Image (cartoon, rainbow, N blue to C red):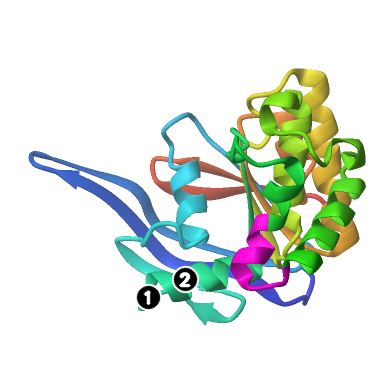
């Protein structure tokens, strides 16, 4: 394994969902470390906890027990504002459904994380234009999500995830809502940009072919994470 810096890690994290009369252990003492430039896939049946794991790694939910560390900073004990700032600076998210804001253009959607960070409108626009050009959407800057194809919307979502120059991309079924050809194009784009930017990439997916294209593969089963293989 590379001696590159660990950008995201979890130590003995457990997630239990409880309600009156029912308690479900979704994740059980999960340990995972992902380094800069490393690509990781997580497969598993629907309901196995793949999304829950990504949400915990990304600080979108607090595990029942255990610790998540992002770029050397533990998430435990942070205020929501502190956690949000850490995510904005170190993580990019791509989901199955693009989650673009319908009232804004592709350019505005992609530039928004930079505005939230406090960068100037001019700088945010310039950086958004640059990354949209890199994902092949320079001709769609002013188009709203409803005016884009499914593949174009997902490319814009990838651009939004990358515009902040994060250390790691967390992708939850990023091509699960696309046809096979378009899915392959978006998968290739993700891998190309990951390599170019030396990012870590963690993907939860049902697509076994996509999963096997990443360097390290895991399976979530019965709340436990099992390493399947390492691609040299």
What residue does disc 2 label? 83
In this rendering, position of residue 208 left or right of residue 28: right
Q: Does the stretch in magenta take in 115?
A: yes
Residue 115 coordinates in the image, percent (x, y): 65, 65
Residue 141 showing in the rendered view: yes
What residue does disc 1 label? 79
Residue 138 coordinates in the image, percent (x, y): 91, 42
In this rendering, position of residue 20 left or right of residue 25: left
Q: In percent of the image, x 79 and y 71: which residue is there?
A: 2
Stretch in magenta: 112-120
Q: Residue furthest left?
A: 21
Q: Secondary structure at mark 1?
A: loop
Density class for disc 1 (Cα within 10 Å; few <14, some 14-19, many ≥20) is few
Q: In percent of the image, x 64 and y 69: which residue is there?
A: 90
How far is the residue under mark 1 from the one under mark 2?
6 Å
Camera-side residue of 110 and 8: 110
Q: Does the stretch in magenta take in 224?
A: no
């Amino acid at each position: 394994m590379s001696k590159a810096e660990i950008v995201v890690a979890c130590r003995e994290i457990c997630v239990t969902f409880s309600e009156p009369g029912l308690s479900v252990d979704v994740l059980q003492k999960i340990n995972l470390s992902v380094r800069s430039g490393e690509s990781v896939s997580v497969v598993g049946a629907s309901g196995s906890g793949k999304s829950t794991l990504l949400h915990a790694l990304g600080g979108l939910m607090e595990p029942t027990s255990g610790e998540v560390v992002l770029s050397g900073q533990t998430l435990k004990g942070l205020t929501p504002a502190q956690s949000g700032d850490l995510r904005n600076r170190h993580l990019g998210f791509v989901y199955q459904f693009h989650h673009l804001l319908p009232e804004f253009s592709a350019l505005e959607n992609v530039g928004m994380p930079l505005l939230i960070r406090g960068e100037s409108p001019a700088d945010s626009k310039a950086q958004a234009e640059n990354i949209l050009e890199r994902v092949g959407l320079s001709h769609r800057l002013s188009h709203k999500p409803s005016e884009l194809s499914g593949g174009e919307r997902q490319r814009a979502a990838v651009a939004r995830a990358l515009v902040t120059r994060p250390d790691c991309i967390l992708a939850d079924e990023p091509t699960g809502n696309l046809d096979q050809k378009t899915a392959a194009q978006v998968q290739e784009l993700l891998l190309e940009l990951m390599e170019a930017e030396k990012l870590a990439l963690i993907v939860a997916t049902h697509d076994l072919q996509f999963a096997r294209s990443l360097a390290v593969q895991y399976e979530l089963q019965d709340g436990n994470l099992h390493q399947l293989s390492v691609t040299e």
